[in-house]
Amino acid sequence: MLQVIYYIIITVFALLLLLEIVKKRPFTELVCIAFVLVTFALRALHIK
Amino acid sequence: MRNELIVAIVMFLISIGGSIATKNDKKWSVLFLFIAALAGSLVAGMGVRFREIVEGPFGFLDSMLCVCAASVLVAVLDRSGAFVLLYSKISKVRFGVLRAFLILFFIALPSMLTGFATSSLLTTGKLVRNLLEKQGEKKAPVIVAVGAFLGVLLPPNCIPAIIAANGAGSVLPTPYSGFFLPLLVVALPAFIVYALMEYRTLASLEEADMHDRGASAALAVLAIVMVAVIIEGVFSSFIWLGGNTLVFFVAALLVLVLSRFYGSAKETLDVVSDGLMKAVVPMAIVFALGSFIEVSSMTGVRGMFSYWILGYSTTAVMLVLMAASLIIGYFFSIPIPAFLITYAVFPIGWLANTVIVTGCSVVLAVIGLVTRRGGIMENNGLKRTEVLKNICVPAFLVLVMGVLLVVFGDKMTFLIM
């Protein structure tokens, strides 16, 4: 149950970051978002 | 020259070069740590190893998810008016010393929840700074920065301790749990002394009056969160609420539902995204550091370090690396000291004594406060000497507590709950 909740939390954050990355932002901010997004997305894929 | 040493030098030079070129800009640090990790892998002749580069951040992910949830909670609380209402209640306290303590706690509160200083600087700190500046107080930015610094050190979340915890152990990082009381012990003396030092200024802040139904509900949620955080931190062996990440996430949802701006989907999305974006840079730095550490382990730098320190006591290694971190951090800000601190706690092993880990980690928080560029004291319009004079007491007290925890940590295991 808790795994599912954490999966939801990480997915919500990843989706919101995805929305943020498409906005016009400075290069360094895009790098930061991309780094976090990739980590979140890969982790979400690993939750069993 | 040993191959591992060449790898370490290349990685360090890229990171330090980046710090110099960008004047310690945190957003650029992420990129340079990432490039340094890639370069280390290439210099070692191992090619571009995406597995290690991605695996490194995973060690930090659970703790940073909590930071992220806390940042969203702080953003929704700020937007709901809960902080302004809280200030109006604190400002009505008549007893001066108590009022000073409460205002310092009020400044520290967002950073306490999230673990990074910007959180306080942009919310409660901004509110107090404006009021202090209106009264003509020149020290306003320093008081707010010290409050934020103390907030970073106070539990539940403390990014320096999260970084240090990841360094302890060889294969698996030490989980970020059992840090509540050690962090409290490190931060409380400085908190008490600084509140007393600045009590006249803090107690002289003007009263504010505000009443808002949505804000009252949000404030009630904040009170419940504080109780839940204490239960999670101190009594988690008896009652487990599902972790602070869950507590913060549910609390943020509750505030959204109870506050007046619920109903406007765009506004709700904006405020949640705002909270998320405030946490993105600290999270990205920590994740990039994870890649840097993982590549250093993969290429044998950690092995070389283990061999070098064999003949010395663990405490001596930690104290030397703490001192080196402080000196490097003064000039080049966080990235290299953060790496050194993870190596400082490495010899104490997996499931390390969190009291000792906390002691080591305070250096990173102090660097954030005292660093020449890129720290929380930047762009405050004050002279450097004036700033250092005002921050030296809390910074020194925190450092002393850190050293005491490192030296006597083995005898203080009763603090680990």
Image (cartoon, rainbow, N blue to C red):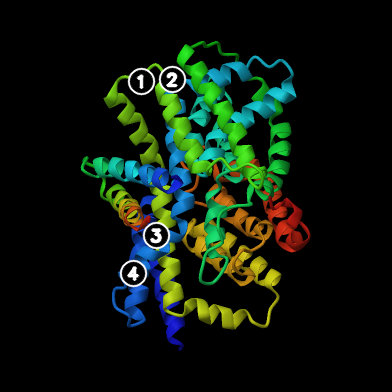
Counting other residues with Cα less than 10 Å from the Cα at mark 3, is it few (<14), some (14-19), or many (20 or more)? Answer: many
B2 relative position to B198: left or right: left
How far is disc 3 from disc 2 in space, using C-alphas? 37 Å
Parent chain of label 2: B
**Residue to which mark 3 is pinned:** B288
Seen from the viewer's position, the closer of residues A6 and A32 is A6
Amino acid type for the residue under numbered disc 2: Leu
Q: Which element type, helix, strand or loop, lies under badge 2?
A: helix
Helix, strand or loop for disc 1: loop
Q: Is residue B294 something that shows in the picture? A: yes
Q: Which circle marks residue B262 in the picture?
A: 1
B170 lies above or below B74: below
Q: Which is more toward the observer, B107 or B259?
A: B259
Q: How far apart are marks 4 and 2 (CA)?
A: 43 Å
Q: Which of marks 3 and 2 is nearer the N terminus?
A: 2
What distance separates the C-alpha of mark 4 from that of mark 3?
14 Å
Q: Quadrant of residue B274?
A: top left
Q: Where is residue B238 in the image (x, y as percent from the top left)?
A: 66, 44
The image shows residue B106 at horizontal and vertical percentages of: 59, 29
Residue A9 lies, in percent from the top left, at 38, 42
- Could you tell me the amino acid type at mark 3? Ala
Cβ atoms under marks 4 and 3 closer than 8 Å: no
Residue at the disc numbered 2: B258
